[in-house]
Amino acid sequence: MLWPCAALPHAPLAPRTTLRLGGAAEWLLEPATPAELREAVQAARADGVEPRILGGGANLIVDDGVLPGVVITTDRMKRLFRPQDAKLDLAETADARIAPAPREEGLALVAWAGTTHQKLLSSACDLGWSGLEGLAGVPGQVGGGVAMNAGGRWGEMWDCVERVLVVDEQSDLVELAREQCTPRYRNGGLGRKIVVSALLRFRFDAVKAVKERAREFLLSKNKVQPVTLLSAGCIFKNPDPERSNGLSAGQLVEQAGLKGTHIGDAWISEQHGNFFVNRGQSTARDFLALIELARARVVDRTGIVLENEVKVWTAASTEGAPSGAAPSGAAPSGAAPSGGAP
Ligand SMILES: Cc1cc2nc3c(=O)[nH]c(=O)nc-3n(C[C@H](O)[C@H](O)[C@H](O)COP(=O)(O)OP(=O)(O)OC[C@H]3O[C@@H](n4cnc5c(N)ncnc54)[C@H](O)[C@@H]3O)c2cc1C
């Protein structure tokens, strides 16, 4: 197969996810520019395949074995710059260099999809531009962050998104204004559109104040999350607080007595009930079985069906945003579920 950009057959995906588990992609395409990304999507669709898009792999479980079809990674699309013209047209400014403008001017950054959250946040902090401090400690890339509306109690990605450039369902490059989009809790509301770049607008502030806020948020998260272990962040979305009596998904898992439960090397963190970790050799199958076990126990206890926040890519799933059920017939390969520490 001749692809319009760098392409790897049978490429292992585990090293490209924060969980470090799962199998390989039949094809992994690595576009380096917006035009190449569009062409890669077009080529996959022309081949009868809907491509899956991989950002930083920080919110993703990839199934074991070979995933048929095409995965497109945005890893090579890391450009971040201050747009030069007043129109802020994403398509037209896509090749602009960072303008050496005074920091009080513009207050806008254009980030290509593969720019890491960390790079985006540190650049905004250095400029004293406020708005994305809540992304401190949230791994991933801008494309994934916009698609997921990454964030938390201190703010989320779409607080700053003014426009996005996407590859739409017809494989055209289209620019969308914020008003045309419907971002919500952990969902950018873009459906199957693929994020190419985003124009982010900030508030002017003192450099020190912005940096201190980001640091404070990071330290708060580090106190409660198992940040040194392999995870995909929160597994479940928080349920409607009216139904859960204000309890978060992590609290519901904890109250069901599940902290420390494991199947093989897939563990529910002792520290945070909504973080499931790979203690080294977990398979996707065990990980998915552990998720289903937790979901079932919480339903039994409370009647609340927890919905996945994490995306699951199985051979059978389409883009990767199904309800998150384990592959049919999945059975844990490791030890029977057990509570308590090893
Ligand atoms: C330690 C840890 C802490 C975390 N804390 C938080 C937190 O506080 N808040 C939070 O929201 N998340 C958190 N997460 C989860 C994760 O960081 C975010 O969801 C992040 O936005 C995922 O971005 P990504 O680039 O890694 O996306 P990926 O995991 O690569 O992909 C996630 C989904 O986005 C889609 N996607 C990726 N790129 C694109 C694109 N260019 N266009 C369209 N769709 C795309 C994928 O197809 C997939 O469906 C945490 C994760 C970890 C490991």
Image (cartoon, helix red, strand yellow):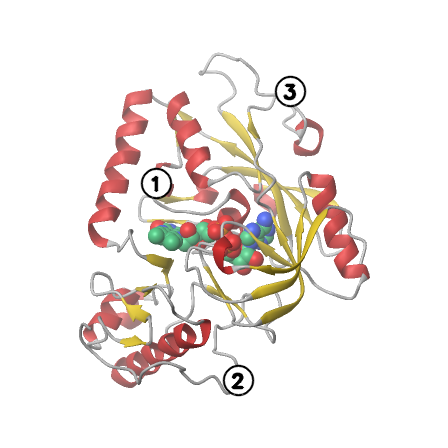
Residue drawn at x 49%, y 49% is: 56
Whether 257 is drawn above or below 134: the answer is below
Q: Is residue 309 left or right of residue 338?
A: right
Q: Nearer the viewer, residue 145 or 139?
A: 139
**Label at residue 136:** 1
Q: Position of residue 306 (x, y in %)?
A: 37, 73
Q: Amino acid at mark 3?
A: Asp
Which mark is in front, 2 or 3?
2
Q: Position of residue 162 (x, y in %)?
A: 55, 37
Quadrant location of the C terminus in the rendered image: bottom left
Residue drawn at x 58%, y 64% is: 24
Q: Position of residue 323 (x, y in %)?
A: 49, 73
Residue drawn at x 73%, y 43% is: 36
| Residue matched to label 3 | 85
Residue 229, quarter of the rendered image: bottom left
Q: Is residue 137 left or right of residue 329?
A: left
Q: Nearer the viewer, residue 337 or 220?
A: 337
Q: What secondary structure is marked by label 1?
A: loop
Q: What secondary structure is marked by label 2?
A: loop
Residue drawn at x 22%, y 45% is: 220
Which mark is in front, 3 or 1?
1
Q: Amino acid at mark 2?
A: Ser
Q: Whole-Å distance between the Cαs marked 1 and 2?
A: 37 Å
Q: Earlier in the sequence, mark 3 or mark 1?
A: 3
| Residue matched to label 2 | 328
Mark 1 and mark 2 in contact? Answer it, CB < 8 Å.
no
Q: Earlier in the sequence, mark 2 or mark 3?
A: 3
Q: Amino acid at mark 1?
A: Ala
